[in-house]
Amino acid sequence: MPNESTGAPLDIIAASLRRERARAGLSLTEVARRAGLAKSTLSQLESGSGNPSVETLWALGVALDVPFSRLVEPERQEVKVIRAGKGPTVFAEHADYACTLLSACPSAARRDIYLVSAEPGVPRRSDPHMSGVVEHTVLCAGRARIGIMDDPVEMLPGDYICYPGDVPHIFEALEPGTFGVEISEYN
């Protein structure tokens, strides 16, 4: 399980935001508007200050029409090992939920792989991602309700679920130490 001291490096997030905004040809004001953020917040993130939540980074990914991973992962390497509790991790604002990017989408594919962890309490409620996103989750430990907001499914270790990520969805831990592997597939 990731620990709270391991976060996605702010310099990587800042450089990624500047790169993707320039690629999209959008102003700071327009990206902030599309993401529902204050322009000053986006400016701080692009300068490497601030502490973006997973919700903020997802909103910026949607606003820039890029996968979440493109905002938190540095340049790819030939061989990559991420030790337990390490890796670029961001935390939810209102839920005890952490998301660690394990593998960003290679250029010939359209998917990202994450290790997600959550504790009982406030569930992680996700707004819709980009159109066509499909999420796949295999629960590794604990027990959780996962899926579309209106009809989540109770999952046990080893269970797999696939659901549309472009509609409101939820990850609710029902036991301490709940975690799983999630694949976000972009069409």
Image (spheres, rainbow, N blue to C red):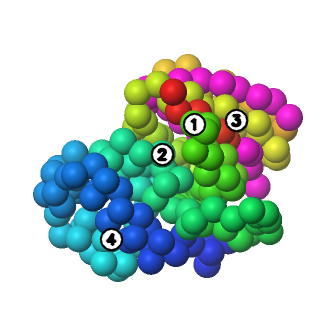
- Tell me where residue 34 sits by quadrant: top left
- Corner quadrant of residue 77: bottom right
Q: Position of residue 17 (x, y in %)?
A: 36, 62
Secondary structure type for disc 1: loop
**Relative to residue 175, is residue 52 drawn left or right?**
left
Residue identifier under label 1: 110
Q: Earlier in the sequence, mark 3 or mark 4?
A: 4
Q: CA distance from mark 3 to mark 2?
A: 17 Å
Q: Is residue 26 above or below residue 7?
A: above
Give the class, few, some or many, for how many residues have Cα within 10 Å of label 1's Cα (few <14, many ≥20). Answer: some
Which residue does the image show at 53% across and 53% down from the upper left?
Answer: 69
Q: Which residues are magenta?
A: 158-181
**What amino acid type should be assigned to the residue bearing mark 3?**
Thr
| Amino acid at pointer 4 | Leu
Residue at 38% of width from left, 71% of height from top?
A: 14
Nearer the observer, 167 or 114: 114
Q: Position of residue 19 (x, y in %)?
A: 35, 62
Res. 120 visible in picture? no
Pointer 4 residue? 45
Residue situated furthest top in the rendering: 151
Disc 3: which residue = 137
Q: CA distance from mark 1 to mark 4?
A: 26 Å
